[in-house]
Image (cartoon, rainbow, N blue to C red):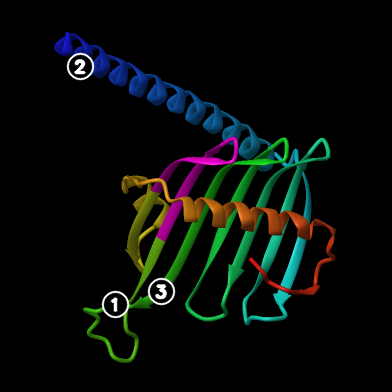
Amino acid sequence: MNRLFILFFVMFATLSSLGQTLNEENEISQIRTRFGEIMAAKSQDKLNVKELNYECSNDPMMGSISFYYENKELVLIEHSSNDGSHGGGTEQYFISKGSLFFYFEEVSFWQFAPNSNDSEQPETVDIYKEERLYFHENKLIRHLLKEFQTASNEDAAMVSSKTPNKKMEIDHYLEKDVLNTFQKLSAKQSLNSGSAINCDW
């Protein structure tokens, strides 16, 4: 009897895990489809856009926030920033019916190459980090991370395409942070370009 119970429990747990995996893959597929639709509309200039250029009142950072609308519905927030020195980054928040469903971030900075032998014109390398976060009903369901570096004569897009993503453990602190930043950026829609704002994200 105990053996039958254990066997039944193992089978139930296996089927339950398989069901969760299939559901997650279905949700990821839907997210990628909607992502592709928004990016296609953006590339074809089919989205209305409002751009907010800003300087932080509490920080040396500056940048821009672009709000993209499809039939008056906000579908994408694109936030680009730099600190005026060695690097910057871009965040994209993809939205459906007011909720975040996909987040993409690319951060890069440059540094002198450690093996450079030219003291007058030293070689540099660019360091990149890309993060992809998939959300379902305001819950983080997948986190992919990609890190790579390029020399000054290398194409970053080409290197990125050849670098695999790493599947990360779900980080609920990261989940909360991204969702909070999304809400704060969404609230900036009414501001005018050139405003000195409190960069509270």
94 w.r.t. 20: above or below? below
Amino acid type indicated by mark 1:
Ala
89 w.r.t. 121: above or below? above
> Quick one: 144 or 37, which is closer to the camera?
144
Give me the disc on residue 6.
2
User: Splitting the image into 4 quarters, where does residue 112 fall?
Assistant: bottom left
Query: Helix, strand, or loop for circle 1?
Result: loop
Q: Main secondary structure of the magenta part?
A: strand
Query: Helix, strand, or loop for circle 3?
Result: strand
Q: Quadrant of the C terminus?
A: bottom right
Q: Circle 1 sits on which residue? A: 113
Query: Helix, strand, or loop for circle 2?
Result: helix
Amino acid type indicated by mark 2:
Ile
Identified at 37% across, 52% down, the residue is: 146
Q: Residue 155: image x %, image y %?
A: 39, 57
Amino acid type indicated by mark 3:
Trp
- Left or right: 92 in relation to 119: right
Q: Which residues are magenta?
A: 129-144
Residue 78 is one of the magenta-drawn residues:
no
Residue 135 is one of the magenta-drawn residues:
yes
> Quick one: 81 or 120, which is closer to the camera?
81
159 w.r.t. 123: above or below? above
Q: For the residue carrying disc 2, how many other residues have a C-alpha within 10 Å: few (<14), some (14-19), or many (20+)?
A: few
Identified at 68% across, 81% down, the residue is: 58
Q: Earlier in the sequence, mark 3 or mark 2?
A: 2
Identified at 25% across, 12% down, the residue is: 8
Q: CA distance from mark 3 to mark 2?
A: 56 Å
Q: Circle 3 sits on which residue? A: 110
Q: Residue 176: image x %, image y %?
A: 55, 53
